[in-house]
């Protein structure tokens, strides 16, 4: 098996897992709680408005995961996945430490690292990007995309205020 074959397997598995997580947020398939359940969970975590951020996260997982698996617009797909993982680490897992056995960020770190590596170095020859010959410039598309992705994560987690999305007070509950 070639390196491109290995990258294909990695992209299919990781991308598929993200699609599955997103579908769980949108529907009750795969043991998910649907958008109502995801919105309630986001509200408990302090996301304002919760439904908006649940839809954003689910869309990033489904669309980003599908594009990542296909190797299409790979750096942008990877950025979507890294953003979701960074948000999950900051809001849920960081305080619990590294190891997943205690709810830590180990799993998120692995998925985020895989997405980062493929976003930086490319999806390999067995990808739509390679087949069509219109891959985005690497690693610059990913590197430059980190800034808006980081801003989005900071807004989502309440570390950066954005009054239009957060209401008249412009405050996120966790930013107090």
Image (spheres, helix red, strand yellow):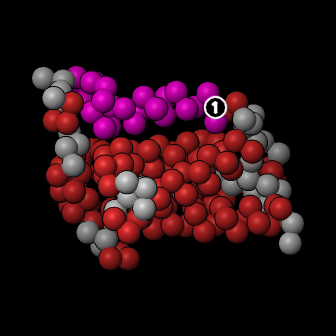
Q: Is residue 19 above or below residue 30?
A: above
Residue range corresponding to the magenta coloring: 142-167
Most frequent secondary structure within the magenta stretch: helix
Please provide percent x and percent y for residue 127. Answer: 75, 57
Q: Residue at x 62, y 54 (%)?
A: 114
Q: Residue at x 12, y 23 (%)?
A: 169
- Element under label 1? helix
Indicate whether residue 151 is drawn in magenta: yes
Identify the residue under disc 1.
143
Q: Residue at x 70, y 41 (%)?
A: 120
Q: Is residue 70 above or below residue 80?
A: below
Indicate whether residue 44 is drawn in magenta: no
Left or right, 116 with reference to 126: left
Q: Residue at x 64, y 66 (%)?
A: 12
Q: Is residue 121 above or below residue 165?
A: below
Please provide percent x and percent y for residue 109. Answer: 51, 53
Q: Is residue 61 visible?
A: no
Q: Nearer the viewer, residue 36 or 158?
A: 158
Please provide percent x and percent y for residue 54. Answer: 30, 51
Q: Nearer the viewer, residue 132 or 82?
A: 82
Please provide percent x and percent y for residue 105. Answer: 42, 55
Q: Residue furthest left?
A: 169
Q: State which quarter of the image contains the C terminus.
A: top left
């Amino acid at each position: 098996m070639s390196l491109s074959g290995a990258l294909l397997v990695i992209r299919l598995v990781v991308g598929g897992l993200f699609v599955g997580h997103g579908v769980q947020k949108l529907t009750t398939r795969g043991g998910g709680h649907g958008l109502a359940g995801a919105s309630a969970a986001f509200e408990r975590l302090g996301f304002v408005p919760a439904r908006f951020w649940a839809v954003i996260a689910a869309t990033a997982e489904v669309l980003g995961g599908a594009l990542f698996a296909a190797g299409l617009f790979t750096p942008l797909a990877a950025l979507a996945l890294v953003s979701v993982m960074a948000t999950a680490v900051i809001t849920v897992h960081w305080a619990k430490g590294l190891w997943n056995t205690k709810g830590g960020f180990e799993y998120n770190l692995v998925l985020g690292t895989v997405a980062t590596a493929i976003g930086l170095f490319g999806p390999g020859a067995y990808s739509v990007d390679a087949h069509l010959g219109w891959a985005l410039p690497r690693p610059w598309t990913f590197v430059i995309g980190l800034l808006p992705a980081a801003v989005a994560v900071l807004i989502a987690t309440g570390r950066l205020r954005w009054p239009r999305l957060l209401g008249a007070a412009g405050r996120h509950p966790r930013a107090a």
